[in-house]
Image (spheres, grey):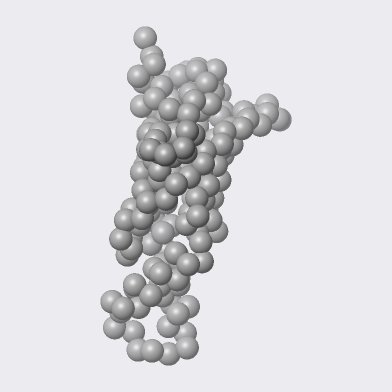
Amino acid sequence: MLTVAAEMFLRSSPDETWAALGRRSTYLRFPGVTRGSEAAGSLQHMLDLPILDTIVQTVTLSIARVRGNGRRERRFSLRGPMVSIAGCWTLAPADDGVRLRVTLAYDIAPSLQEQAVNMLRSRSPLPIRTDADAILGRAVDEFFETRFGEHATACCDAVRAQIGTRSP
């Protein structure tokens, strides 16, 4: 499992931000997420991952709220067969807006991880030895972590855009 985080400041009320994080349309602005064509409620998630070709998976979105200790949190998940994402938005009200932090935990299917290692191995000048898989595995993890970090920032930008389109 890989975990990444990003944060930003919004000139928005906590209530407006809270409401935006509860809207399904906000999550349709996330990198690679679009409405599914088959079943109602399903979404498509195009995974543009380093090393691998683009992979499209069907995902389900769930959104929940958690309140406690004076903080507001909204949890969400995008569950798919290749990559599942468990996310948590944390809102911290400030005098002139709200500080918003997103933490994304990615669960990558072992078969996808193996596919990435094999693809990297096919391009690698590393000699075949017992520690080559460990080296390649760490490289794949770093590639994925970098891309998922970019996705966390893009998630924050999506919320900013969603709130901006609803502002008077």
Horizontal side of residue 68 vs 39, given as left or right? right
* Residue nearest the observer in this picture, 101 or 82: 82
Q: Position of residue 148 (x, y in %)?
A: 42, 51
* Residue nearest the observer in this picture, 57 or 84: 57
Residue 159 lies, with reference to residue 11, above or below; the image says below
- Tell me the residue at 51%/41% (across/down): 60
User: Residue 115: which quarter of the image?
Assistant: bottom left
User: Residue 145: which quarter of the image?
Assistant: bottom left
Residue 13 appears anywhere in the view: yes
- Tell me the residue at 44%/64% (across/down): 112
* Residue nearest the observer in this picture, 101 or 49: 49
Q: Quadrant of the N terminus?
A: bottom right
Q: In which quarter of the image is the C terminus?
A: top left
Residue 119 lies, with reference to residue 78, above or below; the image says below
Q: Position of residue 91 (x, y in %)?
A: 56, 29
Q: Where is residue 86 in the image (x, y as percent from the top left)?
A: 56, 45
Q: Kindly give the residue lying farthest to the right in the view shown.
A: 69
User: Residue 92: which quarter of the image?
Assistant: top right
* Residue nearest the observer in this picture, 15 or 64: 64
Horizontal side of residue 84 vs 143, given as left or right? right
Residue 18 lies, with reference to residue 89, above or below; the image says above
Q: Where is residue 68 in the image (x, y as percent from the top left)?
A: 70, 30
Q: Kindly give the residue lying farthest to the front in the view shown.
A: 38
- Tell me the residue at 52%/21% (across/down): 19
Residue 98 appears anywhere in the view: no
Horizontal side of residue 80 vs 73, given as left or right? left
